Image (cartoon, helix red, strand yellow):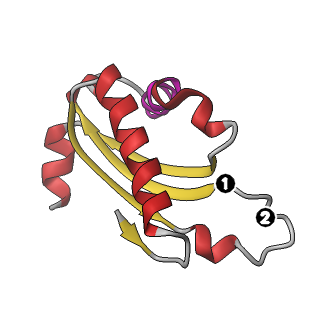
């Protein structure tokens, strides 16, 4: 994971590993990439903790699913992390052929 803030790399890699493990248990993960932007929000008046993350998630399990259904599949996989550890998650959910076009 690329760290773009002052948060502990240990904490960042821990949340990345946990998300990746949960996704892998629920789908055939082809590629997973995450950036942590928590540091950009630490001084905001409304920041109450939790990671601010951006992810690229590639799985052919997304085939024929709408964008909303793809995101719901991810939220189901990561479960309660969205209630506590993660404050915001921006994601690109792609099948392999879509991902290869972006390279």
Q: Quadrant of residue 64?
A: top left
Q: Position of residue 73 (x, y in %)?
A: 45, 25
Q: Give the quadrant of the N terminus.
A: bottom left
Q: Residue furthest right?
A: 45
Q: Which mark is residue 47?
A: 2
- Prevailing SS of the magenta stretch: helix
Q: Quadrant of the C terminus?
A: bottom left
Q: Say if 80 sits above or below 6 in the image.
A: above
Determine the secondary structure under disc 1.
loop
Circle 1 packing at 10 Å, graded few (<14), some (14-19), many (20+), is some
Q: Which residue is mark 1?
A: 50
In percent of width and height, residue 93 lies at: 36, 41
Specify start and end residues of the magenta stretch as a single range: 67-76
Element type where label 2 sits in the image:
loop
Q: Residue shown at 39%/30% (left/top)?
A: 22
- Give the residue at x 32% y 22%: 25
């Amino acid at each position: 994971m690329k760290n773009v803030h002052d948060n502990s790399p240990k904490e960042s890699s821990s949340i990345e590993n946990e998300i990746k493990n949960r996704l892998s248990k629920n789908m055939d993960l082809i590629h997973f990439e995450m950036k942590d932007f928590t540091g950009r929000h630490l001084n905001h008046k409304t920041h109450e903790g939790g990671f601010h993350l951006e992810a690229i998630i590639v799985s052919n399990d997304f085939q024929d699913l709408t964008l909303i259904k793809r995101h719901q599949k991810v939220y189901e996989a990561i479960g309660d992390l969205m209630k506590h550890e993660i404050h915001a998650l921006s994601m690109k959910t792609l099948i392999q052929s879509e991902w290869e076009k972006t390279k």
